[in-house]
Image (tube, rainbow, N blue to C red):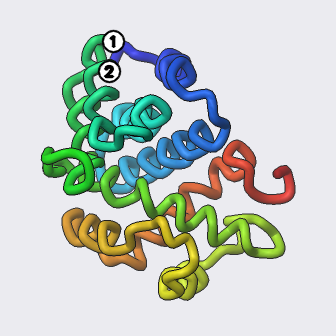
């Protein structure tokens, strides 16, 4: 792939000014890279898909039905591989897109997008504000509390884990492990 991570980050920042959106993109990027390395995927490509998956969110949040569609178009126009544009569309399947995840990269992106938010929120309520001491059982406890991170669609995450297919506990564990690699970058831990 001829597109560098710096070029992708520059493109992301062109359309995204909110720090929270950049941090979410970095979290999903790291998670996608971790899953790719464990599942035999193209790590660079999976990370690009994770970094750019919500590229259009700040533009489309007032018209959520346009989310993923604008971004996929921008990526195609910028010369990104079709696999990246399709992954962006597929991560919104059943929400704002009718593109069903088919490849492993698409299935993982669909699954971990929401889950990274839940894991990060679970870390933020810990005294350490860290994923370094976060365990799967702690995330599962928060998962059961419907008032906790109420915007996270747990059914969507379960559906995604089944599509991969992978046990939910393993998916959660891998997200935690992936986020440990970028903890400071995404505003967690003692550096936050």
Residue corresponding to mark 1: 78
| Residue occupying image coordinates x 81% and y 70% | 128
Q: Is residue 91 above or below residue 178?
A: above
| Residue occupying image coordinates x 57% and y 77% | 148
Q: Is residue 113 above or below residue 72?
A: below
Q: Quick one: SS at disc 2? A: helix
Residue 44 image point, x, y percent: 40, 32
Closer-to-camera residue (142/179):
142
Q: Tell me the quarter of the picture where residue 154 sits.
A: bottom left
Residue corresponding to mark 2: 75
Q: Is residue 147 visible?
A: yes
Residue 114 image point, x, y percent: 43, 59
| Residue occupying image coordinates x 65% and y 48% | 182
Q: Residues within 10 Å of mark 2 (few under 14, many from 20)?
A: many
Residue 52 image point, x, y percent: 42, 32
| Residue occupying image coordinates x 40% and y 74% | 170
Q: Quick one: SS at disc 1? A: loop
Mark number, residue 58: none
Q: Residues within 10 Å of mark 1 (few under 14, many from 20)?
A: few
Marks 2 and 1 close (CB-CB < 8 Å)? yes
């Amino acid at each position: 792939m001829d597109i560098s991570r710096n070029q992708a980050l520059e493109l992301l920042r062109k359309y995204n000014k909110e720090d929270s959106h950049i941090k979410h993109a970095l979290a999903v990027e790291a998670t996608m890279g971790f899953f790719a390395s464990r599942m035999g995927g193209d790590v660079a490509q999976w990370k690009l898909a994770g970094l750019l998956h919500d590229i259009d969110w700040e533009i489309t949040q007032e018209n959520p039905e346009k989310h993923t569609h604008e971004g996929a178009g921008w990526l195609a126009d910028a010369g990104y591989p079709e696999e990246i544009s399709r992954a962006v569309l597929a991560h919104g399947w059943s929400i704002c897109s009718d593109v069903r995840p088919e490849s492993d990269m698409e299935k993982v992106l669909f699954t971990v997008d929401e889950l990274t938010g839940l894991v990060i929120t679970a870390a933020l309520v810990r005294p350490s504000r860290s994923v370094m001491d976060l365990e799967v059982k702690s995330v599962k406890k928060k998962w059961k509390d419907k008032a906790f991170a109420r915007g996270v669609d747990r059914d969507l995450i379960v559906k995604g884990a089944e599509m991969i297919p992978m046990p939910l506990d393993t998916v959660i564990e891998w997200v935690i492990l992936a986020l440990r690699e970028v903890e400071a970058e995404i505003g967690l831990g003692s550096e936050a």
